[in-house]
Structure formats: C-alpha cells, structure tokens
Amino acid sequence: MPKPTSVTLSLVLLMLGFFNLGGNFKMASGQKTWCIANPSTASAELIENLDYACSHVGCSQIQQGSACFYPNTNLHHASFAMNLYYQRMGRHSLDCNFTNSGLVSLTDPSYRSCTYESGMQLEQFSIPYESGGGAVVENGTSGNQTSETWCVANPATENDRLQENINFACNHVDCSPIRDGGSCFRPVTLMNHATFAMNLYYQTTGRRNTSCDFKGSGLIVIRRPSHDNCSF
C-alpha cells in the first residue's frame, strides 16, 4: 500500500496534467464535434481557409447544384470546407485552428439537406485550456453547461432569422457594444451582430443549452469567438 505522501504526490501530478495552463483537457468519450468559421472572420481570410481546406479534401458538396451550395456565402462555404478538413484530418483541435479563425462546435451545424460530416464519435479530444475554463462534460438539448462555452450563429442562418435573433436577445440584454461606436460594431454584418447578441443572452441566462437554440440557429462552441477589440 503506497504511503500517504506518495498518493498525494500522484494526485498533484495528475491534476497538473489536466490543469496546466496552455495544456489540454480530454473531452468526454463519445462527444461529437464540428468545425466552423468564426462569424466575424473577414472575407479574405474565409477565402484563404476555403482554398486551403479544398486543396486537401473534396469540396464538391458546395459546388453549384449540390446540397450545400446555398447559402452562397463565403462564411458558409468556408465553414463547410473547414469542417470537412477537420473531420478528415482526425478531429484534432489544431485542425480547426485556421490561424485562430476556426471554432470547435458541440452542436451539429447541418441544415436542411446539407449534412456536415461528423465521422465516428471521438474517444478522446484535446481542448486547449484557458484560465477559468473547464472540461466539457455535457452535450445535450437541455441543462447547464459546466465549462466555458459560447453561443454563435450557425453560418447558414438566413438574414431574417439573424435579425429576429438580434431583436429577441437585445430585448433582454444590453446590446450597446454592437451599436455604432461600440467595441463590437464591426464587422457590420447581421451575422456578427447576431452572434454577439445571442452569446450575451446565452451567458446571461446561465449558459443553458436551450438558451443557445434560437429556433435551431445557434451553435455552442468551446473556443472564445472574441475578435479585435470585441470581447465575448
């Protein structure tokens, strides 16, 4: 039987392995994940991500006439290609980095007849640790998230739905940062403004999975979507 000091040392080393700053967490077994582009990403960078991913994987699904061509936006096409690359490369966190413009999603971004590939469920998945964060232990449609998670708009969301999400969220939270002159006003797109408002509502209401539903247009992600001077 090991001495108490040996047991204590072992526990300390184990904790350091999980909570070392700059280290990784292991996702619970069976957790599916997807990769999408940060809604605030500039068009030029989205095109770079699209070209890079499609040079490694087939992107026929987003060609005109295919199931995932619409909406015909750089954000959606880049997100689809980035996810395809992420899945085919083995779903490692670095495969969804794309110069910090990628977000790992716990919510399936598939919509209508367009299916985002997810592959087999993961046995383990490394999540870069941020101070104050935690390990993701839940993935469902209700209940509380127990780690740092954020809410963003699905890249395929139509403008009417984005505006409805903004109106709903801003009736409950302070959306001054996305007004003219605010720190999150730019980029001036419905996608960026909706994502900020949706996330603020999600955080304010306790990060419940249902608080990021927005009639199926919200995605829960595990990487902070902050950009420039805009903090989420």
Image (cartoon, helix red, strand yellow):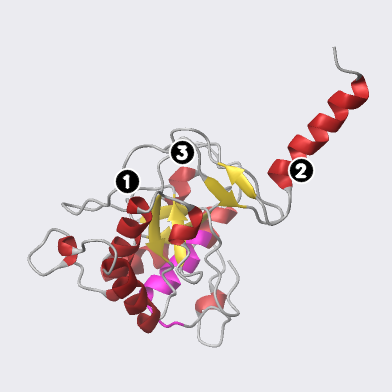
Determine which residue is flagged by label 2.
16
Q: Quadrant of residue 163?
A: bottom left
As for residue 196 lying within the magenta part, the answer is yes
Q: Which residues are magenta?
A: 187-199
Say the numbered circle drawn on residue 118.
1
Q: Where in the figure is residue 199, as x and y percent of width and height?
A: 51, 60
Determine which residue is flagged by label 3.
139
Alpha-carbon span between mark 2 and mark 3: 25 Å
Say the numbered circle drawn on residue 178.
none
Say few, some or many: other residues with alpha carbon within 10 Å of mark 3 (under 14 / 14 to 19 / 20 or more).
some
As for residue 142 lying within the magenta part, the answer is no
- Kindly indicate whether the residue at mark 3 contacts the one at mark 2 (C-beta within 8 angstroms): no
Tell me the mark number nearer the camera, choosing from 1 and 3: 1
Tell me the mark number nearer the camera, choosing from 2 and 3: 2
Please report whichever mark, 2 or 3, sits nearer to the chain's N-terminal start.
2
For the N terminus, the image quarter is: top right
Give the residue type at disc 2.
Leu
Q: Where in the figure is residue 84, as x and y percent of width and height?
A: 30, 57
- Residue 208 lies, with reference to residue 60, above or below; the image says above
Q: Where in the figure is residue 219, as x and y percent of width and height?
A: 41, 54
Give the residue type at disc 1.
Ser
- Residue 152 lies, with reference to residue 184, above or below; the image says above
Q: Which residue is located at x 32 percent, y 78 percent?
A: 47
Which element carries disc 3, helix, strand or loop? loop
* Front position in the image: 201 or 75: 75
Q: Where in the figure is residue 150, as x and y percent of width and height?
A: 52, 56
Alpha-carbon span between mark 1 and mark 2: 31 Å
Q: Which residue is located at x 46 percent, y 38 percent?
A: 139
Alpha-carbon span between mark 1 and mark 3: 15 Å
